[in-house]
């Protein structure tokens, strides 16, 4: 069974899947038991599935279905959304701020914020002039990062009122397709990957108005420069003053490939920051990230995820279980976890058909699946560098 979409609820046993052969059917299963709990069919192709502890969201081309994750009942349907061929949407991992973000337009970069707890639209953020390409909530759900199809500017907004907090310039290269955005757990860093060979990491310091005031009060040459830029703002084109105000990358990574879809995430290993990049060629890359100095990040570990053997056999190295799994690395960690189970799922599923289960049995199975058992051996802990297999060499010429 070819798998088109697979999403795991943090480190729990709850897995939501969509097969290539049945793109309109969502299958919800208990992965550890290898049993299917339930399945749902929709009117059109499922383009994305997002989960947190309270909600499961299914994205179709022109609608979004919000389910209660405990019993999978449809709580609300957002209909007649702008055509969303990429299935672009994101759901906050924080249950207290369980917000859903999706494009409010397919011609400009409007972000629609929806409250999935109170089931009502919260606000609309005019983020970019061109259509959206990527969205990401910070871990506590009160900030949202955005990128457009142009791919040159990354912006961060306050969710509750749409205030722009930060603006970063990713680059000036045209035709850049942003692959992913991800915050660190403390929301101090934001990483961005694309179809180029560079991953950018931005540092979210104080809003620039506060920094400008502090700098001006200190008698430094930067203070005088800031005054000069501010004084000339009325005479310079707005595009020029915008560039002066845009932040630059704090750190960067040069990947051994380009043009491949990938996701990035920032996590901590023994209180040391690490950047994770998982690519569609089946590799997970682990880089250092100097939280104080930034700069170029160096490759620490590389692991092949598809089960094939490299020149160095890393497939035989075992990994151990995780705790809650609710970290900014959840997206990348899910790719690591899913790589080991996608191909084997069809042969593992067994037991009673979900149609033969009562509603009560399905409810209890959903509750059991959403728990995160300690020591579950099907996931990566990402707690210790020693747990990663040795660096393996790619066989292509990009190294």
Image (cartoon, grey):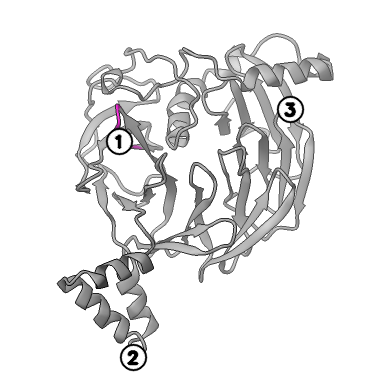
Work out whether 163 lies above or below 86.
below
User: In the depicted view, which residue is nearer to us: 143 or 155?
Assistant: 143
Residue drawn at x 29%, y 44% is 257
Q: Quadrant of residue 169?
A: bottom left
How many residues crowd around disc 3 within 10 Å: few (fewer than 14), some, or many (20 or more)? Answer: some
Residue drawn at x 53%, y 17% is 344
Q: Label 2, on which residue?
A: 235
Which mark is drawn over residue 274?
1
Whether residue 274 appears in magenta in the rendering, the answer is yes
Indicate which disc, 3 or 1, sits on the residue closer to the N terminus: 3
Q: Quadrant of residue 243?
A: bottom left
Pair 3/1: label in front: 1
Q: Position of residue 140 (x, y in %)?
A: 52, 43
- What secondary structure is found at the residue carrying circle 3? strand
The reply to whether residue 88 is visible in this rendering is yes
How many residues crowd around disc 2 within 10 Å: few (fewer than 14), some, or many (20 or more)? Answer: few
Q: Label 3, on which residue?
A: 39
> Contact (CB < 8 A) between labels 1 and 2?
no
> Contact (CB < 8 A) between labels 2 and 3?
no
Q: Which residues are magenta?
A: 270-276
- What secondary structure is found at the residue carrying circle 2? loop
Q: Quadrant of residue 361?
A: top right
Residue drawn at x 57%, y 43% is 92
Q: Position of residue 393 (x, y in %)?
A: 21, 29
Tell me the distance, in whole angstroms, between the alpha carbons under discs 1 and 2. Answer: 43 Å
User: In the depicted view, which residue is nearer to us: 375 or 280?
Assistant: 375
């Amino acid at each position: 069974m070819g798998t088109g979409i697979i999403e795991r609820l943090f480190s729990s046993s709850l897995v939501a899947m969509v097969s290539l052969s049945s793109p309109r059917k969502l299958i919800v299963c208990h992965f550890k038991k290898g049993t299917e709990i339930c399945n749902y069919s929709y009117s059109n192709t499922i383009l994305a599935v997002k989960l947190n502890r309270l909600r499961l969201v299914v994205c179709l081309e022109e609608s979004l279905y919000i389910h209660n994750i405990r019993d999978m009942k449809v709580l609300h349907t957002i209909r007649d959304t702008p055509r969303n061929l990429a299935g672009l949407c994101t759901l906050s991992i924080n249950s207290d701020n369980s917000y859903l973000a999706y494009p409010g337009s397919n011609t400009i970069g409007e972000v629609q914020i929806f409250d999935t707890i109170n089931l009502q639209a919260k606000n609309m953020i005019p983020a970019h002039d061109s259509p959206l390409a990527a969205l990401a909530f910070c871990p506590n759900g009160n900030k949202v990062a955005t990128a457009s199809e142009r791919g040159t500017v990354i912006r961060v907004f306050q969710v509750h009122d749409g205030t722009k907090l930060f603006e970063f310039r990713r680059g000036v290269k045209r035709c850049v397709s942003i692959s992913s955005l991800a915050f660190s757990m403390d929301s101090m860093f934001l990483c961005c990957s694309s179809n180029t060979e560079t991953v950018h990491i931005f540092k979210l310091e104080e809003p620039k108005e506060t920094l400008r005031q502090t700098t001006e009060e200190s008698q430094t040459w930067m203070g005088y420069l800031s005054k000069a830029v501010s004084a000339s703002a009325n005479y310079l084109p707005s595009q020029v003053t915008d560039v002066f105000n845009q932040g630059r990358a704090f750190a960067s990574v040069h990947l051994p490939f380009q043009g491949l879809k990938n996701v990035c995430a920032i996590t901590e290993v023994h209180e040391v920051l690490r950047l994770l990049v998982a690519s569609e060629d089946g590799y997970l890359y682990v880089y250092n990230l100097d939280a104080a100095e930034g700069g170029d990040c160096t490759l620490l570990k590389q692991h092949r995820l598809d089960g094939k053997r490299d020149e160095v056999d890393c497939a035989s190295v075992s990994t151990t279980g995780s705790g809650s799994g609710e970290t900014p690395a959840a997206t990348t960690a899910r790719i690591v976890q899913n790589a080991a189970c996608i191909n084997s799922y069809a042969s593992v599923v067994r037991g009673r058909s979900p149609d033969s289960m009562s509603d009560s049995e399905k409810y209890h199975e959903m509750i059991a699946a959403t728990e995160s058992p300690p020591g579950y051996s099907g996931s990566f802990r990402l707690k210790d560098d020693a747990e990663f297999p040795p660096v393996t060499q790619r066989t292509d010429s990009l190294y």
